């Protein structure tokens, strides 16, 4: 299903360090948003620049750049939490993904990622604590969803629509994570 993601926004929860690697491997033509710190890192700046990824340094420019990337044909991968999930904490999506979906007027492809054991490779995980048991990363690609199915009214102001869409997406992902 990921092979047909042109002109779509691919949204995924972010339970581990490896989520990005997995999604980029499955969607090598995708654009990604990369936090500003990686653009300054001597280890990663060359790679993110060469890949043509989008920096999150300027939030206003970010939305327009991401919408343009989607409208030009490629999929765009976003982790709406903005960072990895803290195990045991509820999902808390930022509004940026919703603003981008609204601006691009595109379908959303939800990707539910489950990690077993929970917490391995998560935010706060220390590499020296690697478990001696098998590690499983499960990826469930859901069918594309149109904005109107998520209850977005194109006539409402973007800030209001973005808040409503963000809440709906959080609910969608919470249900998806809990249902195996």
Image (tube, rainbow, N blue to C red):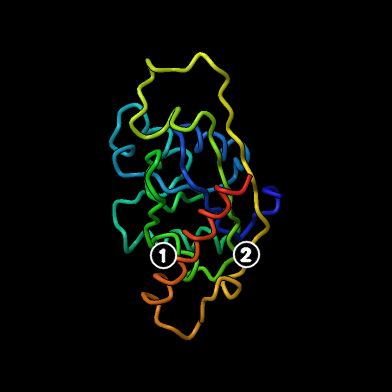
Q: In front: 137, or 55?
A: 137
Q: Write the residue at 37% across / 58% down.
A: 94
Q: In front: 117, or 110?
A: 117
The secondary structure type at the circle numbered 2 is loop
Residue assigned mark 2:
145
The secondary structure type at the circle numbered 1 is helix
Dot 1, crowdedness within 10 Å: few (<14), some or many (≥20)?
Answer: some
Q: Quadrant of residue 26?
A: top right
Residue 155 higher or lower than 140, as above or below: below
Dot 2, crowdedness within 10 Å: few (<14), some or many (≥20)?
Answer: some
Q: Write the residue at 45% across / 49% down.
A: 79
Q: Write the residue at 62% across / 40% down.
A: 139
Query: Can you tell which of label 1 and label 2 is closer to the viewer?
Result: 2
**Residue 135 horizontal side relative to residue 140, left or right:** left
**Residue 45 horizontal side relative to residue 137, left or right:** left
On the image, the x and y values in percent for residue 81 come to: 40, 51
Q: Quadrant of residue 163?
A: bottom left
On the image, the x and y values in percent for residue 51 come to: 48, 40
Mark with earlier residue (1, 2):
1
Q: Decide: marks 1, 2 in contact (CB < 8 A)?
A: no
Residue 93 higher or lower than 164, as above or below: above
Which numbered circle lies on residue 104?
none
Residue assigned mark 1:
64
Q: Quadrant of the C terminus?
A: top right
């Amino acid at each position: 299903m990921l092979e047909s993601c042109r002109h779509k926004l691919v949204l995924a929860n972010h339970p581990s360090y490896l989520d990005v690697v997995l999604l980029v491997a499955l969607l090598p033509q995708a654009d990604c948003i990369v936090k500003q710190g990686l653009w300054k890192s001597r280890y990663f700046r060359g790679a993110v620049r060469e890949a043509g990824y989008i920096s999150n340094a300027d939030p206003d420019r970010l939305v327009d750049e991401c919408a343009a990337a989607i409208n030009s044909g490629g999929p765009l991968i976003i982790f709406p939490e903005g960072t990895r999930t803290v195990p045991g904490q509820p999902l808390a999506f930022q509004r940026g993904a919703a603003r981008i979906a609204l601006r691009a007027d595109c379908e959303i492809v939800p990707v539910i990622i489950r990690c077993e054991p929970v917490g391995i490779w998560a935010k706060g995980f220390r590499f020296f604590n690697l478990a001696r048991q098998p590690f499983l990363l499960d990826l469930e690609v859901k069918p594309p969803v149109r904005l109107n199915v998520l209850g977005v009214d194109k006539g409402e102001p973007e800030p209001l629509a973005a808040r409503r869409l963000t809440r709906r997406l959080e609910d969608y992902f919470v249900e998806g994570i809990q249902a195996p």
